[in-house]
Image: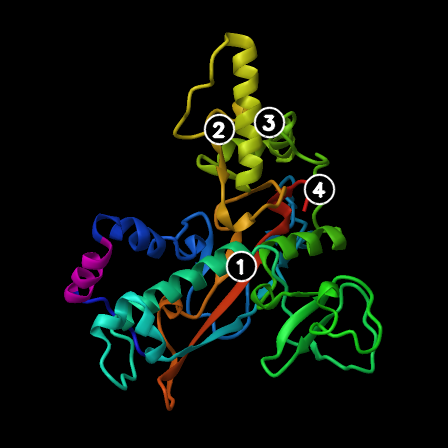
Amino acid sequence: MEELQLTTNDIEKIRGYFGKHYKTLFGNKLLMMISFFSNPYYLVINNLRKPQNLIKMVPGRGMRPLDLNVEKAISGREWSGREIAPKKGMKIIEVKPEELLDTFQSEMLSADSKREPFEAWCWAEEFAVIGDEIESGAYNSKDRSKAEIYDSTKSYEAGEFVKFGPDRLIFEALSNTSAGESPESASAKWEDVTLSSICDGWGTIFKDLIASGEVVPVVTGEIDATNAKESIQKVYNAMPTKMKSKVKNGRIEVSYSVFEFYLQQRNNEHKEKFGAEAPELDHYYVPTSNRKWEIVPVLHNGDSQRIVATLPKNLVVGTDKVTDYGKKSKVLETLHGYKGKVTATLAFQVQDPSVLFINDRP
């Protein structure tokens, strides 16, 4: 694969165009790529190229008084059957340098150029957007790689998925359709879900675990600025005492919208009691956790109201190589420029549902 590097000369030239705002405009964006790949609370599996079983063994209970006349085992071992399977995602990008004549790159654009002047920087920006798409869309994503090709003679029910058009974009039917009502002719009835159709995300897995009965959700109902603290407390209270006391750096993850409700409620209560704004803290902990369980907002939860409490390394994310999200895997020269492709692997799983505690809000 071809890996592009920004040279010092490239950076200085770009900084010359954007001055002191260069770092703010572009530097921060590159740091935002797919945070869960570098989060030590998750189990990150690199070089995931085929399905693999996750690690879990549950020995049965069986201790009893010593009796030399007994040689029979009364309990066994149960092994996890949970599996994480890699799914491939791709993005194809067409570049025509001559289209850059009306941009800031025009001053360095030679006639009949086949590459953009700041190629490495342009691709770094592409990779940052790809990272943001995955970060923001992976939670509720669902594997739709086997969606059928749209058939104009068929009607579709709400919730069905099809591949449509020469680009085979994936669409979900938002309402029932009649024959001939395609994503093009009846666009109000369809939604493009291409970006969230690569694999099953954690949010989708949580719903499946609830549906199968493997996880019983804590009832919190809809969360707002009057009950966010109590909702988080309910999920914490559902955990067994051993889990609450043994884990020293536990996390209860929420979306930024739920975290904002939590801060609003905390602030309102503080103003009522003390007549002043609540002080900002570096860390926010569940009050009864003895500072062992921190309330942490995460980007990948999107606008979900799901509250997630589990052990470190129980949430699993897999990829082929993390660096694949910052490389071009294929380049094809064309008449006016070139086409580039970014291909990478993504997978999510929960290692042990028995230590996963979540609420009933998706």
For disc 3, the neighbor class at 10 Å (few under 14, some 14 to 19, many from 20) is: many
- Secondary element under disc 1, as helix, strand or loop, is loop
Q: Are marks 3 and 4 in contact (CB under 8 Å)?
A: no
Q: CA distance from mark 3 to mark 2?
A: 11 Å
For disc 2, the neighbor class at 10 Å (few under 14, some 14 to 19, many from 20) is: some
Q: Position of residue 291 (x, y in %)?
A: 46, 27
Q: Which mark is residue 360?
A: 4
Q: Main secondary structure of the magenta part?
A: helix
Mark 3 or 4 closer to N-term? 3
Q: Amino acid at mark 1?
A: Ile
Residue at the limit of the structure toward the bottom, as seen here? 335
Q: Which mark is residue 55?
A: 1
Mark 1 or 2 closer to N-term? 1
Q: Position of residue 82 (x, y in %)?
A: 61, 62
Q: CA distance from mark 1 to mark 2?
A: 30 Å
Q: CA distance from mark 4 to mark 1?
A: 27 Å
Q: Depth check: give the residue in front, 121 or 212.
A: 121
Above or below, 307 relative to 34: above
Q: Give the mark toward the camera: 1 or 2.
A: 2
Q: Amino acid at mark 3?
A: Lys
